[in-house]
Every structure is written in structure tokens, then in C-alpha cells.
Amino acid sequence: MGEQRKRLLVTGASGFLGSRIVLFYGKQVQYRYDVYAPSHKEMEITERESVEQAFCRFRPDYVIHCAAVSDVRACEKEPERSWKINVDGSRNIAEASARYHAKCLIAGSDQVYFGSRKKEPHREDETLYPQNVYGREKLGAEEECLDVNPKCVLLRLSWMYDVRTVREKEHGDFFRTLALKRKVLEPLEYPVYDRRGITDVNEVVGNLEKAFMLKGGVYNFGSPNDRNTYETVRALFEALEWDTARLIKNEESFAGEPRNLCMDLSKIQEHGIFFRPTVRALTENCRHYCIDREKERRFS
Ligand SMILES: NC(=O)c1ccc[n+]([C@@H]2O[C@H](COP(=O)([O-])OP(=O)(O)OC[C@H]3O[C@@H](n4cnc5c(N)ncnc54)[C@H](OP(=O)(O)O)[C@@H]3O)[C@@H](O)[C@H]2O)c1
């Protein structure tokens, strides 16, 4: 007899990450999971009653919480509204997960490291003083979720991209913006004072299943990368033998205070969770993407 299917509740399923989680766990490995993905209308995470109703109806074994105000600028503009969603809403999900004995994964961010002067990749146990509202909210969510549910797994995600668009009107990402600019022959300008991991969202989605097994706590979760963004794109172009002449160094952004959001991945690696390094994954994805585009052109 096969193992019993697990009940997986996904929040924020109309968003960039949530929609891909629903596609993967609800379609590709659907024999292992029953997925319930209430829309914003069906479950308002800032209202405890609404969260309670969704949990009571579905009684999940696992929860992946992706609902958020994910736009850094929107958080700066509306700090009260975004705190309510990003911190209070996350706490409601963590609390309900504890009540229903569901293992809960919460999407966090590498932006909690924004403002640190450290030059090396960041470790989870550092003392943090995030410099933007979004980073403070993500850190606040970690603290409050662990307070009400110590079994919660808080995943600090890096900047994510996909080679394909899954939904209409999806917000742009690193890869698709690069592909678009390259096609229209625009100059490609990338900052030299900004360093962070850039991760294929499909690797994040696939690795979440392993994260169900992690014990409660905070984990860096994404591709390792020690290059700045300009060097990252340059290394990609060189690997693909593309012309680097159109690449321009942006020496203004973060010049006053260079930003380092790179993460040390040893904690998840000790648990058998691995991500391809940023440049390797980008190079492999670009090769596949170009082959697919070429096939499309030949057969259309
Ligand atoms: N994308 C990245 O590169 C990235 C990087 C690091 C961390 N993260 C984190 O990963 C998570 C997912 O990011 P994402 O890019 O997928 O975000 P997204 O595309 O902006 O999606 C956000 C989702 O949250 C829902 N939502 C917003 N407020 C809600 C509320 N009050 N109640 C219920 N649902 C609500 C939205 O639904 P409606 O649109 O219907 O309101 C949408 O489905 C977030 O926690 C984000 O901070 C993302």
C-alpha cells in the first residue's frame, strides 16, 4: 500500500511563488498531496476568524505561507498596512498551524540582512538590524511566528526568477527582464555594489518538500553566490559566449553603503538541501530557454 496523501494548504497562491507551488504539488506530484489554495477573498490572513475557518475546513498536514506584501516599495509607502499583512497575518497562520498540528513553512527574505556591514555570506544566527520596512517586517514575522509556534520553519529566500511566465500580469523578475532587454538590444546596466543570491524559483519549490522535515527555526534557503550583480551577469554572458560589450557597470546604486545579502547555506546543506550556485543555474537555464525558443521559431 502506498503512503497516504498529505493535505497541503498554500497561501498567496495567486502570486509568483504560490502559483508555482500549487502547479508542482497539485499537478506534478499530485499523487502525494491534496492541495488547497484559498484565494485572498476566501481567506484574509489578517483576520483570525477567516484563517480559522479555512484551517477547520481543510485540516492541513502541511502549510506553505506565501501571502504577503512582497513589494519593498509598497512596504515603505504603507508601513502599517504591510506590517498587518506581513507580520500579524503570518503570526495568524503560524498560530493556526500549531492549533491544527500542521507543519508550517513561512516565506521569509534575505532582506533581513540589509544594513549589515558584514562582507562574508550571512549566517542565520547573526544579530540583525534591517534597514528597510520590508526587512524589519520579515524579521518581525520570524520572531512572532516562532514565538507562537516553535515548530515553524522560516525560510529566508533570495531574489527568485523563472524562465517561464505562469500567469498573466505576473510581476517581472531578474531572468525575464534580462531576456527582454537583451532581445530589444538595450544596454544592460547592473550594480557593482550589490551582492545577493539569485535563485531559480523551481528549485525553491522542489526543495520545499525536504523543508517539511526541518525542525523549527530560521534557515537561509536559496542559491549561493558571492559575485556582485554586474559580475554575475558578466560571468553568465562569458559562459554562454555572448557579447559583453553591452554590459554596463552601475556604480551609483548602493555606492554609499554597499549591500551584501549573500547567504551562507551550510545549515540547510547539513540537512541534505542543496541549490545550484547562481551563475551555474542561470547558465543552464539560459541554454534550455534558448533551445526552446529556437524550437518554437522553427516549428511555428
Ligand atoms: N519574489 C521574490 O523574488 C521573493 C524573494 C524573497 C522573498 N519572497 C517572499 O516570498 C513570498 C511570496 O512572494 P511572491 O513574489 O510570490 O509574492 P506576490 O507575487 O506579491 O504574491 C503575494 C500573494 O499574497 C496574497 N495576499 C496579499 N495580501 C493578502 C492578505 N491580506 N490575505 C491573503 N492573501 C494576501 C496576494 O493575493 P492578491 O494578489 O489576491 O491580493 C498574492 O497571492 C512573500 O513572503 C515574499 O516576501 C519573494
Image: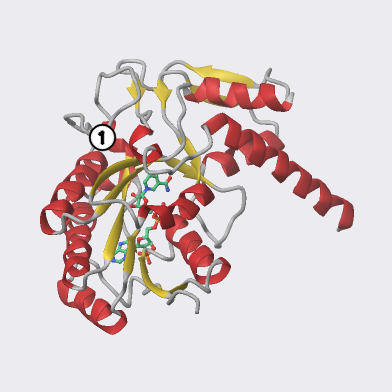
Residue 201: x %, y % from top left: 50, 48
On the rendered structure, is 65 left or right of 169?
left
Counting the numbered discs, the total is 1
Please say which color scheme the image uses: secondary structure
Q: Nearer the viewer, residue 204 or 2?
A: 2
> On screen, 85 above or below 189?
below
Residue 92 in the figure: left or right of residue 261: left
- Left/right of residue 27 with respect to residue 274 in the rendered view: right
What residue is at 32 percent from the left and 71 percent from the top?
61
- Tell me the quadrant of the picture where the C terminus can be found: bottom right
The residue drawn where x is 64% and y is 33% is 283
Q: Which residue is mark 1?
A: 124
Work out whether 209 lies above or below 243: below
The amino acid type of the residue labelled 1 equals Glu
Residue 10 drawn at (x, y percent): 37, 67
Q: Quadrant location of residue 285?
A: top right
Q: Quadrant of residue 152?
A: bottom left
Ligand 1 lies in quarter: bottom left
> Toward the viewer: 175 or 264?
264
- Report x, y in % for residue 249: 53, 17
Nearer the observer, 150 or 201:
150
Farthest left residue in view: 147
| Local SS, label 1 | loop
> Within 10 Å of the Cα at label 1, are there few (<14), some (14-19), or many (20+) other Cα atoms?
some
Tell me what residue is drawn at x 26 percent, y 36 percent: 112
